[in-house]
Amino acid sequence: MRTPFDSPVCISCCTAYGARLGTSSAAPWNEPDRLSVTADRILLNPPFNARGSVLHTSMPEQWPYGPPPPGSDYFAWVQDALRKLNPGGRLAVLMPNNALASASRQDRDIRRNLVERGALECIITLPAKLFRDTAIPVSVWILRNAPSRSRQILFVDARHLGVMESRTRRLLTEDDTSAVVRAVASWQFDRERSVAHAGTTGLSGTAELDDVRDRDYSLNPADYVAQSVSAGRDADDLQTELEASAAMFRRARHVMVLADQQMTKVQRELDSLHALVGVRELTDWEEWPLGAICEVQAGPSPSLIKRTRSDDGIVPVVQPTHLRDRRIVVPDQMSVRHEHAEGTLRSTA
């Protein structure tokens, strides 16, 4: 079997390593007496956070890139497999996507050490729904146990590839896998010839060490690969969004129809009321100064008004404080009886 790096995979060593992992309920780093296995190439799909994989030791020599955080063992699998590589060997490991840019300080420190020491070569993000037992998307990390001559990292964003076999299962076609292999092989070929690889386009893109530093060691390919928005979205996601938008439009249209019917009903009732009482439209009203339609004169003192005010009075009282912005504003209506109003006017005339 050949890899994108055009070198044979050591099937026997990989098989022995995988068989050893599969026969034990404990994680390999917790078995000091386990069989020592080395390989030129390791392909690893570890059982992340499986029972028995709890970290029992934090010896510096066991975790050269940093101790993994408790309760999260994906970087423990990476480092254990790297220690089993022969000089110049490579590791391809399936990783959960939260390892790409998790906020954990220990995870970030491990990502930083992998990048700074040249152990990380390539990251490929895969689409969701590839596996029968889970719908979560994962990524493939390609690493080596010897520092790379190039500080460049290849990022491949393959999240939009594949076809839906069913509503819950996606398949990568031969064209899809070939596209990923070509992207990796082309980059590796340029590196071996010390040729600058083409920039960031379509499926893959490269990043220099300073670029990764600037992003605080985030390893999410979407940060380094330029793609159109539509290319990065699944067909079923687009279908779901379109259906949701259509449903929202139908609901909005229904509300608008009901509102229009209600407005028509209210307008008819207003027209009937205006015809009954002879009220003119607001647009036909005219403004007149108060002095042009009545005689304005000073009234009695406020103390007198307070003595004559009545809860059952029908004559409203307007005080100077109620005159604002050329309008009468009476927040607390005061009224007096009609006889009191006439007597007060006669006494103040």
Image (cartoon, rainbow, N blue to C red):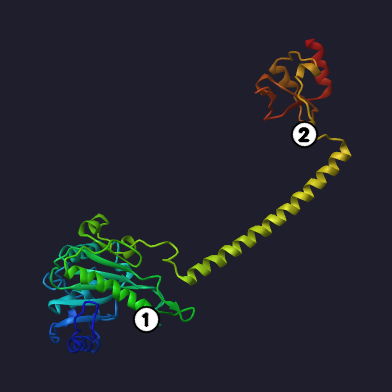
- For the residues labelled 1 and 2, the Cα–Cα distance comes to 74 Å
Q: Label 2 is placed on what type of residue?
A: Leu
Q: Where is residue 106 in the image (x, y as percent from the top left)?
A: 22, 64
Residue 115, above or below 45: above
Residue 202 in the figure: left or right of residue 106: right
- Place residue 335 in its image quadrant: top right
- Place residue 312 in its image quadrant: top right
Mark 1, residues whose alpha carbon is within 10 Å: few (<14), some, or many (≥20)?
Answer: few
Q: In which quarter of the image is the N terminus?
A: bottom left
* Residue occupied by mark 1: 174
Q: Is residue 341 visible?
A: yes
- Place residue 37 in its image quadrant: bottom left
Q: Label 1 is placed on what type of residue?
A: Glu
Q: Is residue 67 visible?
A: no
Q: Position of residue 328 (x, y in %)?
A: 70, 25
Residue 122, above or below 1: above
Residue 196 in the figure: left or right of residue 268: left
Q: Where is residue 62 in the image (x, y as percent from the top left)?
A: 13, 73
Q: Which residue is located at x 46 percent, y 81 percent?
A: 165
Q: Between residues 218 and 55, which one lies in front from this camera angle? A: 218
* Residue occupied by mark 2: 282
Q: Between residues 231 and 70, which one lies in front from this camera angle? A: 231
Q: Between residues 62 and 344, which one lies in front from this camera angle? A: 62
Q: Which residue is located at x 23 percent, y 57 percent?
A: 213
